[in-house]
Image (spheres, rainbow, N blue to C red):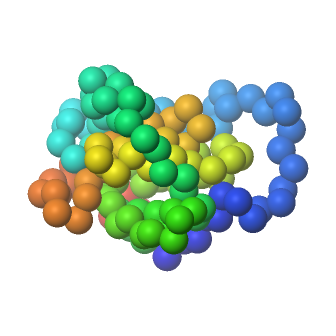
Amino acid sequence: MKHLNQSDQGVPRPAALSMAGLLPPAQLGPSGLCDLYSPGHQIHYKHQADAAGSTPRAVKDTLLDGALVTLLLEDGDVLRWRTHDRRRLARILELVSGQGAAYPQFHALRIGPYWFNCAAESDHWQDCRLSLAADEA
């Protein structure tokens, strides 16, 4: 399990850090693109807009274990979701300072300007080329 604490890193980040070349392209994996919009896969602009219009909950810490994303919220609640592009999520958590925001009603996660459509525990999970490629790595 990889532990990625957003609030206690204490590592100063350059103000003008360029993200060009540092972040993997969205939904791009070694086996190709994911074309699914089901829970845990690509986020549709309408889904993102609906989530952005709802009340966010501050994420204190994020734990990654394979496709499982455990979100420890500031209020003490815990959300367990899944995502197909955990490599991208891990990299963004490492590079983007500040805390994330969870939108539980829409199973959406925002880290800085980056959005993730996650699957709740009750959602049907379907592997895609990205999740299968990550399992092989």
Q: Residue furthest left?
A: 124
Does the image show residue 25?
yes
At horizontal 19% and vertical 37% (from top left) the residue drawn is 36
Vertical arrangement, residue 73 with respect to residue 26, above or below? below
Vertical arrangement, residue 4 with respect to residue 38, above or below? below
Q: Nearer the viewer, residue 68 or 132?
A: 68
At horizontal 58% and vertical 71% (from top left) the residue drawn is 3
At horizontal 56% and vertical 32% (from top left) the residue drawn is 113
Where residue 2 appears, as percent x and y from the top left, is: 54, 71
Q: Nearer the viewer, residue 121 or 65?
A: 121
Q: Find residue 11 and report its image quarter.
A: bottom right
89 vs 126, left or right, is right
Where residue 105 appears, as percent x and y from the top left, is: 29, 47
At horizontal 38% and vertical 65% (from top left) the residue drawn is 79
77 vs 136, left or right, is right
28 vs 10, left or right, is left
The mark total stands at 0
Vertical arrangement, residue 37 with respect to residue 76, above or below? above
Vertical arrangement, residue 34 with respect to residue 10, above or below? above
Quadrant where the C terminus lies? Answer: bottom left
110 vs 94, left or right, is left
Where residue 78 appears, as percent x and y from the top left, is: 42, 69
Q: Residue furthest bottom?
A: 1
Q: Nearer the viewer, residue 19 or 54?
A: 54
Where residue 66 appears, as percent x and y from the top left, is: 38, 67
Does the image show residue 136?
no
